Amino acid sequence: MEQLNETQREILSALDERGGRGNTSNIKRSIGEMTTSNLGKQARSLAEMGLIEKVGEEDVGAPIPANVYALTAEGERVARDLDDQTEVRVGVSEGDVADLRHEVSDLSTALSHLHDRV
């Protein structure tokens, strides 16, 4: 499978947060600033990858109805994996960061001593 870009990951996450289904207006609201044409382009790419499918249109009070997309079974799996990856990144504690800083400092000191010997 192709590498997903940030916008595609955000679309999958937005759909996942809405129970696996949402229209373009909902998705844009979840993601933030994005043109309708860019969203459409990214959605078509996700559909070509088999991660989402267009399942209809909804009247949202705009001149053109909003497309409705749903996650496929594969899209649900990928969205869950994205969520798991986010939880891992968010799960890093301040103590972990402090430990890593200490380790980097120790390594830097050891490297400095090695340079002095050479």
Image (tube, rainbow, N blue to C red):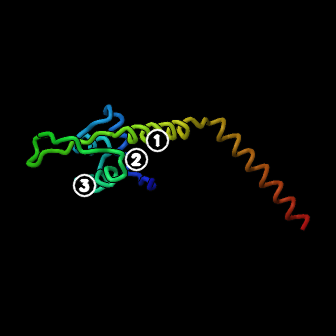
The residue at which mark 1 appears reads as: 82
Callout 1: few (<14), some (14-19), or many (20+) C-alpha neighbours within 10 Å? some
Comes first in the chain, label 2 or label 1? 2
Name the side, left or right, on which 64 lies relative to 118.
left
* Vertical relation: 52 (above or below) 45: above
In the current view of this chain or complex, which residue is farthest to the top? 19
Q: Quadrant of residue 2?
A: bottom left
Callout 2: few (<14), some (14-19), or many (20+) C-alpha neighbours within 10 Å? some
Callout 3: few (<14), some (14-19), or many (20+) C-alpha neighbours within 10 Å? few
- Residue at point 32% right, 44% down? 52
Helix, strand or loop at mark 3: loop
Report the Cα–Cα distance between label 1 and label 3.
Answer: 23 Å
The residue at which mark 2 appears reads as: 9
Mark 2 touches mark 3? (CB < 8 Å): no
Residue 35, label in figure: 3
- Picture coordinates of residue 108, whole percent (x, y): 77, 55
Name the side, left or right, on which 54 lies relative to 51.
left
Q: Please name whichever residue, 115 or 32, is drawn nearer the observer in this view of the structure.
A: 32
Name the side, left or right, on which 109 lies relative to 58.
right
Comes first in the chain, label 1 or label 3? 3
What amino acid type is highlighted by mark number 2?
Arg
Report the Cα–Cα distance between label 2 and label 3.
Answer: 16 Å
What amino acid type is highlighted by mark number 1?
Leu
Q: Quadrant of residue 88?
A: top right
Of tags 1 and 3, the one toward the viewer is: 1
- Picture coordinates of residue 104, whole percent (x, y): 73, 50
Q: Please name whichever residue, 108 or 76, is drawn nearer the observer in this view of the structure.
A: 76
Mark 2 touches mark 1? (CB < 8 Å): yes
* Vertical relation: 114 (above or below) 49: below
